Image: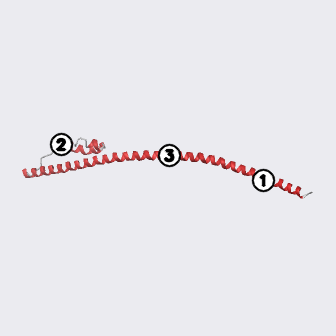
Amino acid sequence: MSISLYIEILLCILLVATLGFCLVLERKLSAMRKGQDGLKVVIAELNGAIGAAGTSMRLLKSAASGAIEELDEKVTKARAAIDELSVLTTSGDRIAARIERSVETQGGSKPPVLPAAAERLAGIGPRVLRTKLPLEQAVGGVR
């Protein structure tokens, strides 16, 4: 046997090994391409989810700003009602004090309270506490 035969056998063995290596490499590249396609799908879904989240955030922000404006308006109305009620209460206290002074200066004794008026006054407090009306309805007749 000549040396060229040995070299050709060696080359054949190396070619078979290279062919085996190429098959293994092709399988791994195929698996990587499949994974890459799956990754593209995941990235596309993630991109869609991010877009939907952005839209939801914009909607939530606009709803929150609307709620803030509505609350500011209600707080302003409530403060105006509080101021008005404070003025009415102060005025009522002054009128009551004047009535007491005039009664004391006229005879020293207070006039008897009528039973019907006493019942009306006693019924006002609990009825207002029981109804739990919104502020606009409860104070609607004051303005």
Label 1 vs label 2, nearer the camera: 1
Q: Secondary structure at mark 3?
A: helix
Query: Which amino acid type is shown beneath numbered disc 3?
Result: Gly
Q: Which residue position holds label 1?
A: 18
Foreground of the two, 119 or 61: 61
x and y percent of residue 113 in the render? Answer: 15, 45
Q: Residue at x 39, y 47 (%)?
A: 64
Label 3 vs label 2, nearer the camera: 3
The reply to whether the C-beta atoms of the residues labelled 1 and 2 are less than 8 Å apart is no
Foreground of the two, 12 or 47: 12
Q: Residue at x 70, y 51 (%)?
A: 28
Residue furthest left as drawn: 106
Q: Earlier in the sequence, mark 1 or mark 2?
A: 1
Q: Secondary structure at mark 1?
A: helix
Q: Which residue position holds label 2?
A: 117
Label 1 vs label 3, nearer the camera: 1
Task: State which quarter of the image contains the C terminus.
Answer: top left
**Number of the label disc, if any, that sits on residue 93:** none
Q: How is the image coloured?
A: secondary structure
Q: Residues within 10 Å of mark 2 (few under 14, many from 20)?
A: few
Foreground of the two, 110 or 4: 4
Q: CA distance from mark 1 to mark 2?
A: 113 Å
Residue furthest right as drawn: 1
How many marks can you see? Answer: 3
Query: Which amino acid type is shown beneath numbered disc 1?
Result: Thr
Q: Earlier in the sequence, mark 3 or mark 2?
A: 3
Q: Residues within 10 Å of mark 3 (few under 14, many from 20)?
A: few
Q: Quadrant of residue 124?
A: top left
Q: CA distance from mark 1 to mark 3?
A: 48 Å
**Number of the label disc, if any, that sits on residue 51:** 3
